[in-house]
Image (cartoon, helix red, strand yellow):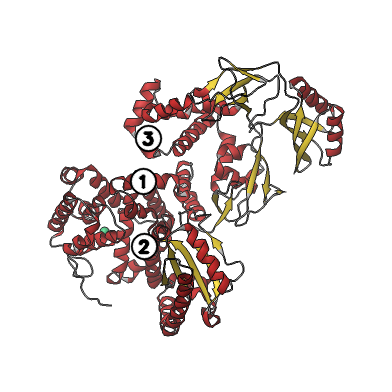
Amino acid sequence: MSKKLDTITIDDILNQLTYLKEEEEIKKIKEAYLFAHEKHLGQKRKSGEDYIIHPLNVALILTEIYADSESIEAALLHDVLEDCDVDLTEMEEKFGSTVMHLVDGVTKIGQINFSTDSDYLIEYYKKIIVGMSEDVRVIIIKLADRLHNMRTLWALPVEKQKKKAKETEEIFAPLAHHLGIHRIKSELEDLSLRYLKPTVFYDIAEKLNKTKVERDKTVGDMMNEVGELLNLHHINHEIKGRAKSIYSIYNKLDKGKKFSDIYDLLALRILVDTEQECYLALGIIHSKFRPLPKRFKDYIAMPKPNMYQSLHTTVFGVDGYLFEIQIRTYAMNEVAENGIASHWAYKEKKDASRMMQNTTEQKLQFFKSIMELSQDKMSSEDFVKSVKDEVLNNNIYVFTPKGDIIELPSGSTPLDFAYRVHTRVGETTVGAIVNGSIVPLDYELKNNDIVKINTNKNAHPSKEWLNIVKSTQARNKIRSFFTKSEKEVFIERGRDLLEKELRKMKYSITEFMKEENIKVVLDTLKLSTIEDLYLEIGNGHHSPKSVIHILYKEEEKEEKEEKKIPKLENTTSDIIVSGIDKIKVNLASCCDPVYGDDIVGFITKGNGISIHRSSCQNLAMMADRLIEVSWSDKKESKYGCDLVVYSNTSDNKLTDITILASKLDVNLSGVKMISRGNNTVYEMQCFVKDLPHLQKLMKELEKESYIKSVERLMR
Ligand code: MN
């Protein structure tokens, strides 16, 4: 195969850079170009072109997603460390430490030694993780690098073509997908198919070509009709006909569909200004074109884990053809095409790289999963297998009761879900409710299931669970529960708590964990290692928030000001708050204090004081906002509280329990039964006068022969 030589120059790049505002940035990019040009002088690519053509093209690809000047510089320089006699010190002196780190990161990912299959894959994954943790721009530059190499793959020998194409299909295209950079993902997939299965590729391309004229006409007609309809309702919009990628058609054919059956070959995309108009447009279209049942998807209300948002529907369109229609705002479209890189187009350039890093750590479930996998101790082969199974392939999406999406490998059970939400949730799981019904713990979850986990603070994992769970993550967590000492459990919990709090407070974890930052924290707390720090958090000696505040003091001030908030409200109360009269108090629903319990108050943000039992586990995280409280002699008539009753029989003893409770003048409401083999667990809400009343009930229940134990529930 031969090809016209590429004639790109630095001016082609500079012409694209009108989106950069600072003259200084352009100057630096020119310097980077001159440096790279000089260093690559005399080197040729396999295609016969001057080597500099390659970095220029990588930079050009990046301008299409509005990359910042540092990334463009790094793209131009990305091959000089490896191919020319340049070292990191020289690079840093000339171009600064950020550009040096970007180039270094891209170079490291490139230096993979090929040996056996899984060895080189694990190398790749690990370097990609490191690259992403340090600066996600490293990965984006690497993707652009790979894209240009794939575009010029024809110049390599067939053996190498196959190897690169396979790598691209297995690693880089999924990576682009998980970062949401659709335009790069799609081209990478098509190019890898072209070299892996050329016959299939050209067959589909030809079929598409043959039907093109007819399809274009049909799509054009439909665009006109839909356009008129939206104009009639005064909705500003833009409609685009949409070409399906060859790879996505191949995927459907591979699943057994015939070419003529792939109805979303005809596809439209409608762009509007506001989210509201998306739904409006959808309604208007459905009122004229009958939708195909079950093909409607609302990814606006429920974005995909890579942040993609859009409405999807399939309708019977003009001439009875089926059309797949996507409706989204211009902003959503930017994210749909460029994913994580869309920060470049929308944010102040200065903030974009920080925003991208934060988004990577906080929003991309893929990144979190892969980070977790890399922290687990497992063999290289297991690691590669888990990354492939859990991160790259075949996932199902289920929801928490609050509507958060959780991504799990298909075949997962409620236990996998529980461990994915949080290790602590997994370890204390006693039952699961899916779509409103109680299910056994080995129930196989399906797409769109809504999953609620019932936990009990005193419950712990059973070895049985190892046979139930599907995800490596859950399996490893269960295994380690049985092998770990208590200290290790605390250390792990401490790390979890700290990372969770950092995410909640919207700080970058990587930034916080930098050596110089951690040193400040350790010195302040007079600790010597990071493990000590985790231990101190895990065992409750320090709250994660107070640790974070050591570094980020400004936020602390804001917090403290909020502390003064408690508004004095005219509330008569059964609680006395020391030093303050008439303040709004409420009983915390996590531990349900009843009259007579040892209690402590927590100053909430703007909602008075919430009363917890002194033994409540949630208090460890609130240490800096607690206040002394006590019961007054004004008793309410009833206090609600949850009991968990463990019975040793599978017989339904609900009636007996109800009768016993009513004899003691305790009202029950909302009893949940969870069957566990030969045992049954009852979770019930009861209303009692005070602590002695509650204790009496618990004692009487425990006297029954069919009851093993009774506990108060703490969430
Ligand atoms: Mn390169």
Secondary element at image label 1: helix
Secondary element at image label 3: helix
Q: Position of residue 337 (x, y in %)?
A: 39, 61
Of discs 1 and 3, which sits in the foreground? 1
Q: Position of residue 527 (x, y in %)?
A: 40, 22
Q: Quadrant of the C terminus?
A: top right
Between 13 and 690, the residue placed more toward the observer is 690
Tally of numbered tags: 3
Task: Give the residue at mark 2.
Answer: 184
The reply, left or right, for residue 475 in relation to residue 372 is: right
Measured in 3D between alpha carbons, the distance from the residue under mark 1 to the one under mark 3, in whole angstroms, is 15 Å
Residue at 55 percent across and 14 percent down: it is 579
Task: Give the residue at mark 3.
Answer: 512
Q: Position of residue 694 (x, y in %)?
A: 76, 24
What residue type is disc 2 on?
Answer: Ile
What residue type is disc 3 on?
Answer: Phe
Label 1 crowd (10 A; few <14 / some 14-19 / many >=20): some
Measured in 3D between alpha carbons, the distance from the residue under mark 2 to the one under mark 1, in whole angstroms, is 21 Å
Task: Give the residue at mark 1.
Answer: 355
Is residue 551 visible in the rendered structure shown here? no
Secondary element at image label 2: helix
Between 215 and 251, the residue placed more toward the observer is 215
Query: Do the residues bearing badges 1 and 3 touch, measured as CB atoms within 8 Å?
Result: no
Which quadrant of the picture is home to ligand 1?
A: bottom left
Query: Do the residues bearing badges 2 and 1 touch, measured as CB atoms within 8 Å?
Result: no
Between 458 and 266, the residue placed more toward the observer is 266
Measured in 3D between alpha carbons, the distance from the residue under mark 2 to the one under mark 3, in whole angstroms, is 31 Å
Please, is residue 28 above or below residue 160 in the view?
above
Query: Do the residues bearing badges 2 and 3 touch, measured as CB atoms within 8 Å?
Result: no
